[in-house]
Amino acid sequence: MFALLDVEQQKDLLAYIRKREKQGNTSKVPLCAVSECYYLPNGLDQSLTEIQEGNLYLCLEERTVYVKGQKIELTTKEFDALYLLIINKRRVMTFETISYHVWGEDYIDVTTQAIHNLMSRLRQKLQTAPDMPEYIISIRGVGYKFDY
């Protein structure tokens, strides 16, 4: 269900869960492979949603991705697609689901070729070395999934 929310709704849900935890009204709720990291930039305590899968690191709030410690520059759509796939690890995301979450209101006009092109660019960027695993797996005629 978490993956069906847009980025703002996901942030609101995480903020709500954190608020309830601080009040002692609920126990910790694990959200996929999402972990919390606390740091003190400029003296402020902030929580980041970070995901680590092997050599791949993703931070939602900073919208950064690193592979083997090397920062990977992604477009907005590439980042959104990677985030959708990674929080739904091993689940096949259909072309329709990907287009809805990545393109938003314009998803109806998105072709499967546009999604293939997006995933191809994303794969190339994540493949920093020949020995790196393929994180994004194509499911012919259906969509894509993230698997590590």
Image (tube, helix red, strand yellow):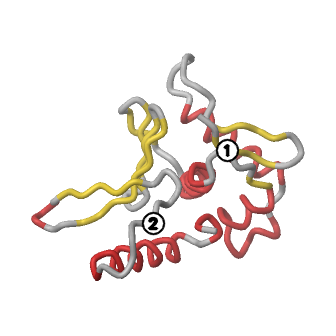
Residue occupying image coordinates x 39% and y 54%? 35
| x and y percentages locating residue 123 in the rendered image | 62, 36
Q: Secondary structure at mark 2?
A: loop
Given the image, on which type of amino acid does mark 2 rest? Val
Residue 32: percent from left, percent from top:
53, 55
Q: Tell me the quarter of the image containing the C terminus.
A: top right
Type of the residue with mark 1: Arg
Dot 1: element: loop
**Residue displayed at 44% across by 48% down:** 51
Nearer to me, 62 or 87: 87
Q: Which residue is mark 1?
A: 90
Q: Dot 1, how many residues are within 10 Å of its Cα: few (below 14), some (14-19), or many (20+)?
A: some
Residue 98's spot in the image, x, y percent?
72, 58
Q: Which residue is mark 2?
A: 29
For marks 1 and 2, the one nearer the N-term is 2
Drawn side of residue 69 relative to residue 13, left or right: left
Image quadrant of residue 140? top right
